[in-house]
Image (spheres, rainbow, N blue to C red):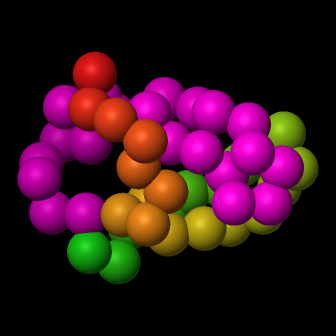
Amino acid sequence: MILLLKCPKCSNQMKYQSQNMILTGKRKRCVYCGKTYNVRNSIIEKI
């Protein structure tokens, strides 16, 4: 499953590929500003 995420700090969008549907506790680091954020709270859409 590929998700489109939006960074809460700089608002840039990134793709995130997850091997399973369990997103609780998953974190991602923004490649643009370096902020680490919760994947589940930043989902824009499923691709």
Residue 9: x %, y % from top left: 80, 60
Q: In the image as oriented, which residue stretches furthest toward the top? A: 47
Q: Quadrant of the C terminus?
A: top left
Residue at (41%, 49%) from the top-left corner? 43
Counting from the top left corner in percent of width and height, residue 6 is at 59, 45
Asked whether residue 31 is in view, the answer is no
Q: Residue furthest left?
A: 21
Give the left or right position of residue 13, taking residue 2 as reference: right
Rendered residue at 26%/74% (across/down):
24
Residue 13, position as x, y percentages in the image? 63, 33
Q: Residue furthest bottom?
A: 25
Q: Magenta stretch: residue 22 in it?
A: yes
Count of numbered labels shown in the rendering: 0
Q: Quadrant of residue 28?
A: bottom right
Residue in the picture at 73% in, 37% down: 12
Q: Quadrant of the N terminus?
A: top left
Q: Is residue 2 above or below residue 9?
A: above
Residue 20 visible within the image: yes
Residue 42: say if magenta: no
* Front one among 21 and 9: 9
Residue at horizontal 44%, vertical 66%?
Answer: 41
- Residue 30 percent across, percent down from the top left: 71, 48
Q: Which residues are magenta?
A: 1-23
In the image, residue 34 sits, relative to residue 26, either above or below, namely: above
Q: Nearer the viewer, residue 10 or 29?
A: 10
